[in-house]
Amino acid sequence: MKFDDIDFNELYVKQKQDSTFKMKSQDAWDKKAPSMNKKVHNSIYNDELLALVNTNDCESLLDVGCGVGNLSLKLATKLKEVNSLDYSSGMLDILKENANEQNLTNIKTINKSWYDSWEEVPKCDIVIASRSMEVVDMKEALSKLDSQAKKRVYLSYKVGGSFLSNDILNAMKREIIKKPDYIYLINILYSMKINASVNFVRSEGRSTVYTSQEDFIKSVSWSIGDISDIEKERLITYYNEKIKDKEESIDYVKWAVISWEK
């Protein structure tokens, strides 16, 4: 078999279906929005990703899966027009509140999902999909991003195939089926005749972001689903021994930033 004969999107779809990590509903993201708004704006992730975004000769942005606006708000100060798209109305409501507080009038919100028609979504100079590509069909999603971009596309995707660290999984004694890793996206883009660049950025991990036992366990449950009583006990032990009152180096998570020019 030749490399070009491999259907990486088919492999992606299969592994995505089998993965332990399931996609969240609109209602789940609506409920998540207030807590996310407290944490997401002051993160090394924003700084490192935005350092890679070239806004030269650009006036417009489409931010796909914009959430509460951690990137939209910052780029609105550099660009003439920002279109922030998310299927969670709760996220968009908070984004609008944030924009009003910062006196930003050039942000337009769009309440759509990956699976809706984007016929009425404006094409923009830059398209960003930040940590928002947990989709059923990756090739279809990448094609949508590419078709909406006039000049540049940037997307970020979790490295390693798991939303939980090995330390946490080992503490729980939980075995998982990983989700597709970022290399699938590179190979799918290659099959689409798109030669993309890859860089890596960091975000703060759970050991850094969550400073209470309750928040930590909720965060783990959000990622992996239902947790048994014995797993909860193990997580409490892990938190008390490894995280609580520890003054150690910051825990980081790695993200691949995949980009290409039109």
Image: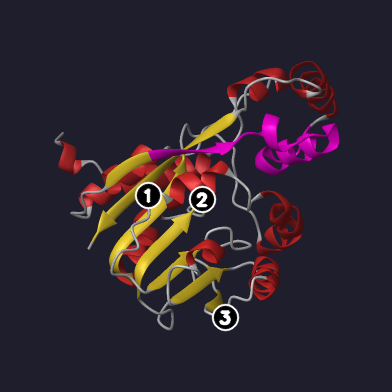
* Residue 221 included in the magenta stretch of the image: yes
Q: Which residues are magenta?
A: 200-227
Tag 2 near tag 3, CB within 8 Å? no
- Amino acid type at mark 1: Leu
Please tell me whether residue 167 is drawn above or below residue 108 in the rendered image: above
Q: Position of residue 139 (x, y in %)?
A: 34, 56
- Amino acid type at mark 3: Thr
Tell me which residue sits at (70%, 37%) in the image: 209
Q: Nearer the viewer, mark 2 or mark 1?
A: 1
Asked whether 36 or 228 is in front, the reply is 36
| 189 displayed left or right of 39 | left
- Reading the image, the residue beneath label 3 is 105
Q: Earlier in the sequence, mark 2 or mark 1?
A: 1
Query: Which residue appears farthest toward the left when viewing the image?
Result: 2
The answer to whether residue 65 shows anywhere in this view is: no
Mark 3 is surrounded, within 10 Å at the Cα level, by few (under 14), some (14 to 19) or many (20 or more) other residues, namely few
Q: Position of residue 147 (x, y in %)?
A: 30, 69
Instruction: Check the picture and name the quadrant holding the C terminus.
Output: bottom left
- Amino acid type at mark 2: Arg
Asked whether 76 or 230 is in front, the reply is 76
Q: Position of residue 109 (x, y in %)?
A: 56, 76
Per the image, label 2 sits on a secondary structure element best described as loop
- Reading the image, the residue beneath label 2 is 131
Mark 2 is surrounded, within 10 Å at the Cα level, by few (under 14), some (14 to 19) or many (20 or more) other residues, namely some
Tell me which residue sits at (67%, 76%) in the image: 100
- Reading the image, the residue beneath label 1 is 52
